Amino acid sequence: MPVPAAVGYAAVGIIAGLVALIYQGPTSFVPGVCERLEPYLLSEVVGQELAVSQLSDAICDHVSKDNPHKPLVVSVHGPPGVGKSMSHLLAARALYNQDPSQQTQCPGQDCPGYKVLYGMDYISSEKEQQLALLRASLLEHCSQYPEALIVVEEYDKLDCSTRGFLRQLFENARAANVTLDRSVIILESNSGYLQLLEVLQAAGHRGKVRAEDAQRVLKDLVFDLWRSDDCEERSDTLKMLALVDFYLPFLPLERPHIERLFGMKLLERRKGLMDAKQAANLTWDEDVVHFLTDRVDFEGPYPIEGAKEVSTLMTRYISRTLRAWSAQQAARKQVALPGADREKKHGALTSRVLSTLKKIKGKRSQPAPKEDDLLPVIHLAVGKDALGNPKVVAQTQQRLEQCVGK
Ligand SMILES: *[C@@H]1O[C@H](CO)[C@@H](O)[C@H](O)[C@H]1NC(C)=O
Ligand SMILES: *[C@@H]1O[C@H](CO)[C@@H](O)[C@H](O)[C@H]1NC(C)=O
């Protein structure tokens, strides 16, 4: 007997709903945040120990409370490219996942309570509509995820009505039938660069910057900014200021941080190469790190774009060299294998024969490993191009022992 279509659709709907439920990922913060958060942040964010340790402590204290009476609100400041966005992304991974990693889909299914509101400087004709949308989506998010991580980027550039809405929501979410008390709110802004520079220079060394000094300077800055906008009563500005629990300084980076970041990126490449089909280890002269760092734009001791140039320079100077190495290696293997020429003519059949040949070869070589079966080591060094300009070159060191023995 044919099943009525409606029943079929309903069944499909229910199954889809169940699947969605199962794959929705964690809807609230998972236990162990305090142990996980700081080491995880420090493993990737470089040079921001002051901000990172305060952020970790603040979040840890907040999630440990049984009955928090307000959301944790943190205002993070600093120039672009010094780790602000990286920090909240990592925090989100660690809040919603026992075992956070680069594979954690965040924002996305692994961090469903994580919401980032980007640059709100929309054109004025759409303002009201935009604000209505923002209001609706934020309220829905908060009712769905009582333990949310909400980030407002460029919040110093919010217009008066958006700021008013956020202030009321953070102050008294219950009026809108949602609660934010268990949530973490991060307000992010690029303002405060000059002020932080002064604090840093006055302290002489970033390790000597006091949390209270940075907090005072940043709080004053935010107060002045908001008062000059003349959006609201002075008392409301003060209320919003008081709502913020921490003002965190992300200080300008310095040369040693950029060097460390290049070192970390090279380690990542090593890992990628070892996992690749044509596995190889990767080593490098310290000169390579200096070569790369010399290509970053600095103003005095500070990289102008923070860490933003690091990826670009890795692509420009390292990726091509490594790709060329892999291609060369593949070509060498082709020549070395018997019947390589014929493979082109006989296609699939020959490739099956070849794979059998490889297996036999693998078995045979177990007792006495041949050169080919040792993990090759690619060594990066600074050499010269045809015009005598420095460039990164890759030298193959066939035997692992050569590297270890050095
Ligand atoms: C909040 O919930 C109450 C009771 O369910 C309802 O009467 C009220 O209209 C709701 N308020 C808003 C702003 O949705
Ligand atoms: C890769 O090279 C590094 C540096 O020489 C070494 O410490 C590491 O053990 C090597 N890894 C493997 C799997 O050979």
Image (cartoon, rainbow, N blue to C red):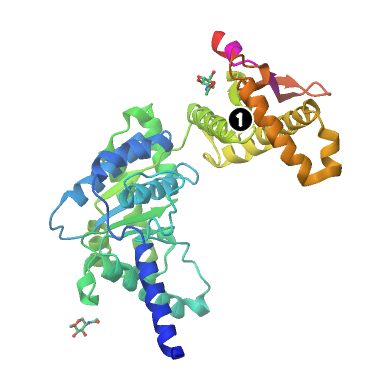
| Number of callouts | 1
Q: Residue at x 20, y 62 (%)?
A: 181
| Residue wearing tag 1 | 279
Kindly state the secondary structure of the residue where label 1 is placed. Answer: loop
> As rendered, which of 323 and 87 lies closer to the eye?
323
Asked if the magenta segment contains residue 306, the reply would be no
Q: Residue at x 49, y 26 (%)?
A: 256
- Quadrant where ligand 1 appears: bottom left
Furthest toward the left, the residue is 66
Q: Please say whether residue 342 is visible from this viewpoint.
A: yes
In the rendered image, residue 374, in percent from the top left (x then y), is placed at: 61, 20
Seen in the picture, residue 199 relative to 159 is either above or below; the reply is: above
Q: Quadrant of residue 274?
A: top right
Q: Please say whether residue 377 is visible from this viewpoint.
A: no
Q: Quadrant of residue 360?
A: top right
Asked if the magenta segment contains residue 400, the reply would be yes
Over which residues does the magenta segment extend? 394-402
Seen in the picture, residue 109 relative to 299 is either above or below; the reply is: below
Q: Quadrant of the N terminus?
A: bottom left
> As rendered, which of 388 and 237 lies closer to the eye?
388
